[in-house]
Amino acid sequence: MDKGTMLNDIEDKLNVVNKGMFKPEDFNDESLGEIEDIHSMVTGRTSISAIEQSAIIEELSKLRNS
């Protein structure tokens, strides 16, 4: 699965208001494994608490290219 699809799935699951917040071009290929891990965790859960949602968004923000 490509980065764009995984990032869109994560945004959808977390109900991110600002769609497109995580653009594939903002992430380098070295972060792909971590994005896959986050994607698996998020899509495998039935619910995610607000605290978990904030932590996931923060983690994705750290992975972005500066």
Image (cartoon, rainbow, N blue to C red):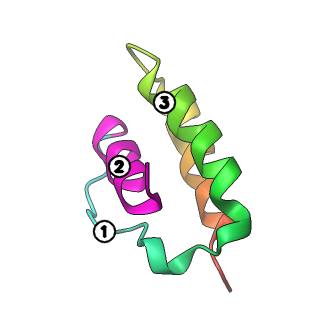
N-terminal of the pair, mark 2 or mark 1, is: 2
Question: Are discs 2 and 3 less than 8 Å apart at CB?
Answer: no
Outermost residue to the bottom? 66
Q: Secondary structure at mark 2?
A: helix
Measured in 3D between alpha carbons, the distance from the residue under mark 2 to the one under mark 3, in whole angstroms, is: 10 Å
Q: Residue at x 69, y 50 (%)?
A: 33
- The crowd level at tag 1 (other Cα within 10 Å; few <14, some 14-19, many 20+) is few
Magenta residues (range)? 1-14
Question: Are discs 1 and 3 less than 8 Å apart at CB?
Answer: no
Question: Are discs 2 and 1 less than 8 Å apart at CB?
Answer: yes
Which percent across, then down, holds residue 61?
Answer: 60, 64
Q: Residue at x 41, y 72 (%)?
A: 23
> Which mark is drawn over residue 42?
3
Which percent across, then down, holds residue 8?
Answer: 32, 53
Q: Which residue is mark 2?
A: 11
Measured in 3D between alpha carbons, the distance from the residue under mark 2 to the one under mark 1, in whole angstroms, is: 8 Å
Q: Residue at x 46, y 19 (%)?
A: 44
Q: Which residue is mark 1?
A: 20
Q: Quadrant of the C terminus?
A: bottom right
Vertical position of residue 33 compared to residue 41: above or below: below
Q: Secondary structure at mark 3?
A: helix
Q: What secondary structure is the magenta-colored segment mainly?
A: helix
